[in-house]
Image (cartoon, helix red, strand yellow):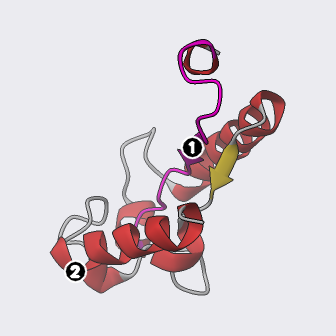
Amino acid sequence: MLFRSVQPNAEICIQSIIHVSKEKDKNPPTYINNKIISKRNKLIKKMAEEENVIYLDLNPALTDSSGYLFSEASTDGVHLNQKYCLVWKDYLLEHTLN
């Protein structure tokens, strides 16, 4: 990994892809739905383990008990609004700073 050669002591974190809302999941383009996102997140997590980097699963902080992005978190079911960008930021700060 190139980062390691430049910054050997850097702590590298990789974030999951955030799930979409229930409404978006029901009517997605063919490549945007939670089933595909979950498959990709499994691959990202596996790669993080192989590369010995930290994998941060954002979905517990940003989704409901069914795994959908909170409906109030986005106007389009994909992109976070300001309030939930702050939730995301807080999650990153909580899980990355020692």
Residue 43 in which image quadrant = top right
Observer-nearest residue: 23 or 3? 3
Observer-nearest residue: 52 or 65? 52
Q: Position of residue 6 (x, y in %)?
A: 53, 15
Q: Is residue 56 left or right of residue 92?
A: right
Q: Residue at x 62, y 12 (%)?
A: 5
Q: Secondary structure at mark 2?
A: helix
Q: Secondary structure at mark 1?
A: strand
Q: Which residues are magenta?
A: 5-21
Label drawn at residue 84: none
Q: Are marks 2 and 1 in contact (CB under 8 Å)?
A: no
The reply to whether the magenta stretch includes residue 19 is yes
The reply to whether the magenta stretch includes residue 97 is no
Q: Amino acid at mark 2?
A: Lys
Q: Position of residue 34 (x, y in %)?
A: 55, 57
Q: Residue at x 36, y 63 (%)?
A: 24
Q: Is residue 13 left or right of residue 29?
A: right
Q: Residues within 10 Å of mark 1 (few under 14, many from 20)?
A: some
Q: Residue at x 64, y 33 (%)?
A: 9
Q: Position of residue 7 (x, y in %)?
A: 55, 23
Is 30 located above or below residue 17 in the figure?
Answer: above
User: Label 1: which residue?
Assistant: 14
Q: Residue at x 40, y 75 (%)?
A: 90
Residue 93 in which image quadrant = bottom left
Quadrant of the image for the N terminus? top right
Is 84 located above or below residue 79 in the figure?
Answer: below
User: Label 2: which residue?
Assistant: 83
